[in-house]
């Protein structure tokens, strides 16, 4: 990587790096608008809140998911639902996105880390413990 930079590589020159766009600004804006229009029922929103609260109540967790982390999960879930062809989010969409969106947002207790507890295990336990809306 350093050799490329030393030879004059400009990382801001995307075409020089061999990167080609897959969609333009208009298509991206349309996709963002479509994702924003994906619905979310009150039950599924309450499920998101319950999941976040459960991360904060886990004895192995020093710092659980924040409200900002919960809104990030909502945004990712809406995008996943749209990409999957749905016009509203479901608990399955939420469950699919919990680990990739939240795994870096949780800080374990030092004792839990020493015992080998993983954030993924905590999140899997939270998914098992929190009642899924019907």
Image (tube, rainbow, N blue to C red):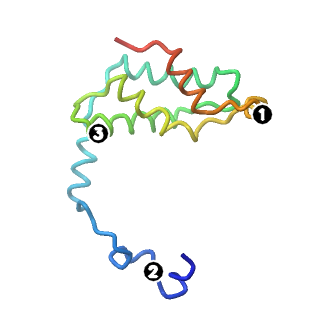
State the separation of the CA atoms marked 1 and 2: 43 Å
Q: Quadrant of the N terminus?
A: bottom right
| In the image, residue 76 above or below residue 95 | below
Q: In this view, does 50 lie above or below 61?
A: above
Q: How crowded is mark 2: few (under 14 residues within 10 Å), some or many (20 or more)?
A: few
Nearest the camera: 98 or 38?
Answer: 98
Q: Nearer the viewer, mark 2 or mark 3?
A: 2
Who is closer to the viewer here, 54 or 120? 120
Residue at image mark 1: 114
Which residue, given by chain and number where applicable, does mark 3 sit on?
Answer: 36
Residue 66, numbered circle: none
- First along the sequence among labels 2 and 3: 2
Q: At numbered mark 1, what does the secondary structure look like: helix, strand or loop?
A: helix
Query: In the image, which is nearer the foreground, mark 1 or mark 3?
Result: 1
**Quadrant location of the C terminus?**
top left
Residue pictured at 73% horizontal, 34% vertical: 113
Q: Which residue is drawn at 53% across and 25% down?
A: 124
Residue under pointer 2? 10
Q: In this view, does 40 lie to the left or right of 57?
A: left
Mark closer to the chain start, 1 or 2:
2
> Depth check: 98 or 67 in front?
98
Count up the numbered dots.
3
Sequence-first tag of 1 and 3: 3
């Amino acid at each position: 990587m350093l050799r490329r930079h030393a030879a004059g590589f400009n990382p801001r020159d995307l075409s020089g790096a061999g990167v080609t766009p897959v969609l333009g600004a208009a298509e991206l804006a349309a996709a963002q608008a479509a994702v924003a229009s994906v619905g979310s029922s009150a039950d599924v929103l309450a499920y998101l809140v319950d999941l976040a609260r459960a991360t904060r109540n886990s004895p192995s967790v020093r710092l659980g998911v924040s409200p900002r982390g919960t809104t990030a999960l909502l945004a990712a879930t809406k995008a996943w639902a749209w990409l999957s062809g749905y016009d509203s989010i479901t608990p399955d969409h939420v469950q699919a996105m919990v680990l990739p969106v939240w795994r870096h947002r949780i800080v374990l207790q030092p004792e839990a880390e020493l015992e080998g507890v993983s954030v993924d295990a905590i999140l899997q336990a939270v998914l098992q413990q929190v009642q899924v809306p019907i």
